[in-house]
């Protein structure tokens, strides 16, 4: 994996062979932020600082973290829980894995700060079950942190104590959704839950629970150490701070990059990431995980890397999982891959997604087999619309966005496929040197 | 399962009170790590140990993709077929694996040595295409690398 | 008391209610598959979606808390279009085999389809196939293709019967309702309720499968006589207009199925499996003939003989039935109550394997009207204690009397509906009608009286106890 080009609020975090170890992390000034928080700030002040930073959730929904924390009533006399969402499963996204593998102590320290702010005695990291090295890195880091006294005993002379458990999933995309994650953490099927109530009111075992993405949490130590103002100095007014982007697909230099919102999209793709192999043009880019709507190569030229700009072309930064698609790639086959995935991962709880995902998958399979009909396109759009905003969690919506985005911008390829019973391109998804 | 109870007890002590239900996933993971799959007697033992309804364990086992109720090959190959891997040749790689092993995804070779499965995104997109072999990520794969892997395993099995 | 508006109608809701609960309380129907008044909110079927005035989207009403001045619309273009889409999705993989489905005629999917969609499916793709005739238990059969995964049955076993025996395995459109493999559903004494609450024809009572179209049947209000709870039930039997001569005659007077009749003060919408087996209990062999000293006689002659015996008795003892109706007990009290020492007899004890008692509905007293009987006659008969030695006549009413308990020299007059080889030991035996042949009421252990109505006429030789006691008390020819 390529090293990020620069690390600003992730404490200018340079990856070395030992950067995941406690000694290395402490040598970089690690665990000073939690000491600062405990020594000089009240829990309310920590939350206020996080709120002031304006940091938005990095898992895909962009919800301001400070506002989420602010819901928790610190004096309600019941246990509160904190959970890091490390169930990174949005296709195209692998930036949390980077943090877990290379900077696990950054997450642990940030979680201590968050746990203090939220008065949490027990915190969790829900990590996807398939992660092997990331699990061993975070579990190893936690062992070190326990041995060093950061967890499990009163910290820095205060009476604040926090225990942390790394909890492994077992293979389910919907568990990346916060409420599905908590169902799973309760040892059950990962069925998402209806809102209301919010998880910050009734979450894990019906107790107030904050679930934050790994990257979101990993920014907390920096925000406390350097202050909200330093965080906001980066990015745009509405998208403050830097954020991690993982880029893959038809790109010369795939990997995890820390980018500053507001940066021209094209410059990032071509200058930083080396552009498309074989000198090809960009046909499309999925900007933030497959659940964000695709942007065309032409649109890439006129937008910047932030939610506000991406919104002008109907998309968003999502989870920062960027997938580059070269010209010559068959979008019908591409959508088939996506719809197969959503069908495979639908938990089956609510009707629109349970029935709709399978239906969309069967339709796209039929189109690819050459048995499509012109009305199939409308049917796909209709099923997408039926899912939009009408499911328990966001997965049904997400599949709809993925389909609607591709159908809106590459509809002619589908018409061609249905009429000619074959792809306008060669039906291949790989990027080859010659057409 | 019985020989794992001491481990389970230690894990249980780390959870807050009232979290017995949360133990279902970690215990099942540990059982599968130990046996290679989850057997009927494991379910019965776990239900007794945790005091959770048996249906909860049955639901969990069938809901999560990683749990298995039957053994797989000694070398279990899972190939990602999601978007980034597909854009970088996963479909060809899976066909190659199938041809090389003589089995389709979901099957095990007659000698029980290899089994093949397809999986969805493993967050290894930047190093696509990827396969997981017995839980370990192998990234930036191609036909030559999987051939070497399979041949090495066959040679080891023949010894 | 937040005031909300549903389709412009003001409703004073209770704080903490959902819009669905407030609507139901006000008699407004919002379609719902997964929502059930006695179960937790699932929010999965999505058909209960409504629109809040001023919003451009729909939301499910079953999980929407009421709030002051909330204005809910249940019949906008958006809501109608959304409901239609949900019904199209719900039937997508449903076999639509109404012609051979037991639920047909009382199926929510069928009703909602015609009310809210009505159009044929727009799908050109094959349906997902799943298991048919899956044996969920000895009593309940599951058709997974008809199942719409509303999870009502699952929640029932977790929240009401607490056997935690049903669940949903697999995921997506391959999800299946299944019973746990430890047989917990087989042991669930309330399992048949899942058949009633299934909104479609997925869960079927094996005993009722293919027995009758539901529109051939009518429900008669009744009370389960199985225990002191007195669950209110409906007894389903053939409608008069559908009684066919060509049909097997007993079928015209058979109870085809039993379902609970919602009574919040007694059983709510539930009843136990024993009540479902009531048809078998009521179809036991009947006592058909009156007898005098063991020989068949006309019922009138037996009544005369019994009256003579009662007349001449000096120290009669009456053992009244704990399964008798309040009306029958009243008639007894008026006619003979002053003449006899009276004890309340336990007619029935738990059969082997029967659930003795639980904290849900089932009571240890297996008689329907012990409370009603003891309100009038406080003394309970103890079968282990000999009857008073000075008794010269015992009037035994109901089943379950052991004639060997008869004190030496005493005569026995026995009134019973069910065949019993020991009836011949009585000096006089008179056959009675059973509860499905008469109306009346039982008072349950909590003092709540529930009425039952007659389904069928009584057989020729049987007497109605309510009429009989007056005849036993009046001397023929004596001045009234």
Image: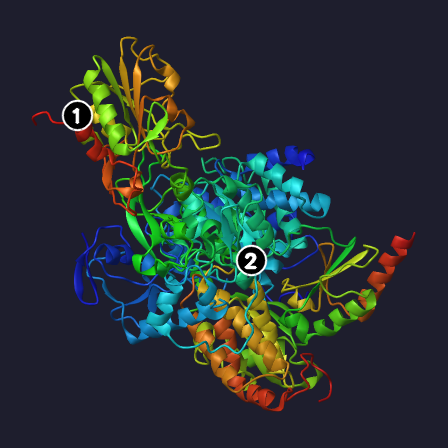
- Crowd band around label 2 with a 10 angstrom C-alpha radius: few (<14), some (14–19), many (20+): some
Disc 2 to disc 1, how far (Cα)? 102 Å
Asked whether, in this view, residue A384 is left or right of residue A344, the answer is left
**Residue C39 visible within the image:** yes
Q: Label 2: which residue?
A: A11
Q: Residue at x 27, y 54 (%)?
A: C21
Q: Residue at x 43, y 47 (%)?
A: C192
| Numbered disc in front, either 2 or 1 | 1
Q: Position of residue C98 (x, y in %)?
A: 44, 66
Q: Quadrant of the N terminus of chain A?
A: bottom right
Q: Residue C31: which quarter of the image?
A: bottom left
Q: Label 1: which residue?
A: C473
Depth check: C130 or C71 in front?
C130
Depth check: C164 or C464 in front?
C464
Name the residue at the left extreme.
C479
Q: Quadrant of the C terminus of chain A?
A: bottom right
Asked whether, in this view, residue C289 is left or right of residue C92, the answer is left
Q: What's the image's color scheme?
A: rainbow
């Amino acid at each position: 994996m390529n090293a990020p080009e620069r690390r600003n609020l992730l404490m200018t975090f340079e990856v070395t062979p030992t950067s995941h170890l406690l000694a290395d992390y402490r040598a970089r000034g690690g665990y000073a932020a939690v000491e600062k928080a405990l020594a000089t700030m009240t829990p309310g002040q920590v939350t206020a600082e996080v709120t002031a930073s304006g940091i938005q959730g990095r898992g895909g929904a962009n919800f301001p973290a400070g506002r989420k924390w602010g819901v928790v009533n610190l004096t309600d006399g019941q246990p509160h829980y904190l959970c890091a969402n490390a169930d990174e499963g949005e296709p195209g996204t692998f930036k949390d894995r980077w943090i877990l593998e290379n900077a696990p102590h950054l997450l642990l320290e940030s979680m201590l700060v968050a746990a203090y702010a939220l008065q949490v005695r027990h915190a969790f990291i829900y990590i996807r079950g398939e992660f092997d090295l990331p699990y061993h890195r975070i579990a190893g880091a936690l062992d070190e942190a326990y041995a060093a006294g950061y967890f499990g005993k009163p910290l820095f002379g205060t009476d604040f104590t926090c225990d942390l458990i790394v909890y492994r999933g077992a293979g389910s995309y919907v568990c990346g959704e916060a409420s599905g994650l908590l169902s799973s953490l309760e040892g059950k099927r990962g069925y998402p839950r209806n809102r209301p109530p919010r998880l910050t009111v009734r979450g894990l075992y019906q107790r107030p629970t904050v679930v934050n993405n790994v990257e979101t949490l990993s920014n907390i130590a920096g925000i406390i150490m350097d202050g909200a103002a330093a965080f906001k100095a980066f990015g745009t007014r509405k998208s403050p701070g830097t954020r991690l982007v993982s880029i893959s697909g038809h790109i010369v230099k795939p990997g995890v990059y820390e980018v500053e919102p507001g940066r021209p999209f094209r410059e990032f793709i071509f200058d930083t990431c080396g552009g498309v192999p074989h000198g090809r043009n960009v046909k499309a880019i999925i900007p933030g995980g497959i659940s964000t709507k695709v942007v065309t190569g032409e649109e890439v030229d006129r937008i910047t890397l932030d939610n506000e700009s991406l919104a002008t072309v109907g998309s968003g930064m999502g989870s920062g999982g960027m997938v580059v698609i070269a010209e010559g790639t068959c979008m019908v086959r591409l959508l088939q891959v996506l719809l197969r995935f959503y069908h495979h991962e639908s938990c089956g709880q609510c009707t629109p997604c349970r029935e709709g995902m399978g239906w969309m998958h069967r339709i796209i399979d039929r189109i690819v087999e050459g048995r499509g009909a012109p009305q199939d396109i409308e049917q796909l759009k209709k099923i997408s619309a039926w899912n939009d905003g009408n499911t328990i969690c966001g997965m049904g919506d997400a599949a709809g966005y993925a389909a609607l985005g591709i159908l809106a911008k590459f509809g002619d390829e589908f018409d061609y496929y249905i009429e000619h019973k074959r792809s306008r391109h060669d039906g291949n998804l790989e990027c080859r040197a010659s057409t | 399962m019985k020989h794992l109870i001491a481990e389970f007890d230690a894990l249980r002590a780390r959870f807050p009170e009232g979290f017995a239900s949360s133990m279902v996933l970690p215990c099942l993971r540990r059982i599968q790590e130990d046996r290679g799959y989850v057997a009927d007697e494991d379910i019965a033992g776990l239900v007794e140990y945790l005091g959770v309804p048996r249906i909860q364990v049955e639901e969990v086992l069938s809901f999560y993709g990683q749990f298995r109720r039957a053994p797989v090959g000694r070398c279990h190959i899972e190939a990602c077929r999601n978007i980034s891997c597909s854009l970088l040749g996963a479909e060809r790689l899976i066909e190659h694996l199938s041809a090389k092993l003589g089995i389709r995804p979901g099957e095990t070779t007659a000698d029980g040595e290899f089994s093949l499965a397809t999986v969805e995104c493993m967050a290894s997109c930047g190093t696509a295409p990827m396969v997981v072999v017995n839980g370990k990520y192998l990234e930036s794969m191609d036909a030559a690398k999987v051939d070497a892997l399979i041949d090495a395993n066959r040679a080891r099995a023949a010894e | 008391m937040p005031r909300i508006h549903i389709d412009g109608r003001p409703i004073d809701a209770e704080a903490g209610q959902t819009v669905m609960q407030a609507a139901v309380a006000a008699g407004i129907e919002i379609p719902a598959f997964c929502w059930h008044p006695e179960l937790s909110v699932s929010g999965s079927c999505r058909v209960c979606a409504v629109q809040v005035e001023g919003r451009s989207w729909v939301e499910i009403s079953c999980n929407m808390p009421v709030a002051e001045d909330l204005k809910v619309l249940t019949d906008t273009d958006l809501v109608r279009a959304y409901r239609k889409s949900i019904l199209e999705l719900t039937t997508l993989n449903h076999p639509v085999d109404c012609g051979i489905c037991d639920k047909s005629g009382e199926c929510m999917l069928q009703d909602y389809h015609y009310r809210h969609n009505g159009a044929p499916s727009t799908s050109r793709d094959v349906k997902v196939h799943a298991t048919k005739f899956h044996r969920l238990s000895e009593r309940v059969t599951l058709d997974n293709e008809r199942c719409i995964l509303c999870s009502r049955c699952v929640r029932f076993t977790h929240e009401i019967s607490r056997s935690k025996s049903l669940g949903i395995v697999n995921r997506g459109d391959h999800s299946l309702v299944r019973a746990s493999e430890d047989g917990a559903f087989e042991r669930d004494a309330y399992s048949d309720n899942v058949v009633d609450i299934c909104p479609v024809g997925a869960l079927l009572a094996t005993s009722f499968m293919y027995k009758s179209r539901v529109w051939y049947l009518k429900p008669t209000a009744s009370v389960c006589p199985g225990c002191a709870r007195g669950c209110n039930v409906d007894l389903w039997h053939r409608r008069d207009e559908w009684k066919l001569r060509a049909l097997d005659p007993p079928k015209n007077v058979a109870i085809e199925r039993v379902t609970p009749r919602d009574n919040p003060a007694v059983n709510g919408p539930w009843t136990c499996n024993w009540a479902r087996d009531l048809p078998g209990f009521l179809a036991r062999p009947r006592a058909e003939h009156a007898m005098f000293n063991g020989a068949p006689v006309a019922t009138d002659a037996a009544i005369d003989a019994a009256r003579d015996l009662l007349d001449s008795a000096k120290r009669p003892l009456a053992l009244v039935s704990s399964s008798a109706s309040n009306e029958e007990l009243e008639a007894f009290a008026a006619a003979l109550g002053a003449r006899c020492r009276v004890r309340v007899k336990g007619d029935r004890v738990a059969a082997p394997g029967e659930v003795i008692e639980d904290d849900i509905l089932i009571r240890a007293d297996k008689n329907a009207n012990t409370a009603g009987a003891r309100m009038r006659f406080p003394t309970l008969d103890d079968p282990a204690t000999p009857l008073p030695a000075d008794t010269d006549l015992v009037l035994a009413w109901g089943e379950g009397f052991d004639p060997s308990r008869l004190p030496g020299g005493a005569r026995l007059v026995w009134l019973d509906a069910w065949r019993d080889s020991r009836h011949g030991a009585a000096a006089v035996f008179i056959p009675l009608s059973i509860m499905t042949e008469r109306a009346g009421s039982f008072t349950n252990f909590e003092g709540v009286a529930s009425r039952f109505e007659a389904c069928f006429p009584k057989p020729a030789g049987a007497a109605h106890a309510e009429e009989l006691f007056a005849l036993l008390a009046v001397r023929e020819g004596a001045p009234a």
